[in-house]
Image (spheres, rainbow, N blue to C red):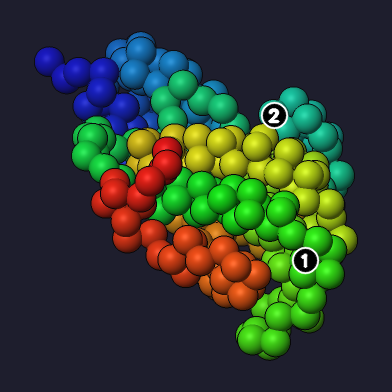
């Protein structure tokens, strides 16, 4: 006898090819997985925590949200594509799921995924993905690199806090054009903290609570990092643990763009490493020679004194 998990997997496969087939009723979808409507509804609901029809509506709403932030189609066109017969019906459903009307959400988007017990979401550009059955339990290098990044920024802030304004605001001559204009030790540390806050907020679907001010007091930066650093690490750890690195995350700004969690983490680590290297050089010039250029090799190996 087919299990609920097997039926759900078959349903997801069928649905992924039938998202735009709005004429396909639940009975027709049940037929495509070779079950009666009664057994189909019962087994899918048991495995997914949602009835098949509710599951399909949620996936279509998630796809509609993706279309709103990545395309130029009108709200009505997006509504029709999602299977709604009217702008009003789509607006009611979207507002209930996302907390604001489609046009308003398009201007200030939050997160694409709607909470669901199954963990199955719309997967841009046009599919669905089942959660991984197996979890890696050995050291996750991505998580360790993010942990090191947050730890090192905290170490740099601790040392920079011992310097005066003249040293903190002295121009750093060695820089990369187009990455940070006229960098200083203070401005780079501010950008490092603000980058973590921006992406942590994007993952959580909230407004960032900290902006990258060039003249930010070091005490303010340390307080902000104390909050956002552990939060960002926890978010990355959860993303990796659940095999979600290829799921979508909204990048705020003008224009709004959509990336994957994996791409976002790579972005944070790449630009973070560049800024940390400049900070490490400035701290070395100021007499702090124990940062080792920000190299993560000893920290990840477990031989760095004081690492978390």
* Residue 97 tag number: 2
> Left of 157 or right of it: where is 274?
left
Seen in the picture, residue 276 relative to 180 is either above or below; the reply is: above
Q: Is residue 147 visible?
A: yes
Residue behind mark 1? 168
The picture places residue 299, in percent across and down from the top left corner, at 36, 52
Measured in 3D between alpha carbons, the distance from the residue under mark 2 to the one under mark 1, in whole angstroms, is: 46 Å
Q: Residues within 10 Å of mark 2 (few under 14, many from 20)?
A: some
Q: For residue 41, what is the image quadrant? A: top left
Residue sitting at x 51%, y 47%: 151
The picture places residue 83, in percent across and down from the top left corner, at 63, 41
Seen in the picture, residue 48 relative to 278 is either above or below; the reply is: above
Residue sitting at x 77%, y 51%: 218
Q: Nearer the viewer, mark 2 or mark 1?
A: 1
Element type where label 2 sits in the image: helix
Element type where label 1 sits in the image: helix
């Amino acid at each position: 006898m087919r299990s609920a998990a097997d039926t759900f997997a078959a349903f997801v496969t069928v649905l992924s090819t039938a998202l735009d087939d709005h004429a396909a009723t639940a009975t027709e979808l049940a037929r495509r997985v070779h079950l009666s409507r009664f057994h189909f509804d019962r087994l899918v609901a048991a495995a997914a925590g949602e009835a098949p029809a509710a599951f399909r509506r949620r996936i279509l709403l998630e796809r509609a949200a993706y279309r709103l932030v990545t395309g130029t189609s009108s709200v009505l066109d997006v509504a029709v594509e999602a299977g709604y017969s009217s702008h009003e019906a789509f607006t009611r459903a979207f507002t209930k799921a996302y907390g604001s009307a489609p046009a308003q959400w398009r201007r200030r988007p939050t997160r694409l995924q709607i909470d669901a017990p199954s963990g199955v979401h719309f997967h841009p550009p046009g599919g669905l993905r089942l959660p991984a059955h197996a979890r890696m339990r050995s050291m996750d290098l991505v998580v360790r690199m993010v942990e090191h990044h947050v730890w090192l920024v905290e170490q740099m802030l601790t040392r920079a806090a011992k310097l005066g304004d003249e040293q903190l605001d002295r121009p750093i001559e060695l820089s990369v054009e187009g990455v940070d204009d006229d960098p200083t030790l203070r401005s780079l540390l501010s950008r490092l903290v603000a980058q973590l806050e921006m992406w942590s907020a994007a993952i959580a679907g909230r407004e960032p609570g900290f902006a990258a001010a060039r003249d930010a007091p070091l005490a303010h930066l340390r307080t902000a990092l104390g909050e956002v650093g552990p939060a960002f690490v926890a978010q990355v750890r959860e993303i990796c643990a659940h095999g979600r690195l290829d799921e979508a995350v909204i990048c705020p700004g003008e224009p709004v763009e959509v990336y994957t969690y994996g791409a976002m983490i790579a972005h944070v680590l790449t630009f973070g490493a560049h800024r940390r290297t400049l900070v490490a050089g400035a701290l070395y010039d100021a007499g702090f020679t124990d940062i080792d250029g920000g190299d993560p090799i000893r920290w990840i190996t477990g031989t760095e004194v004081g690492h978390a």
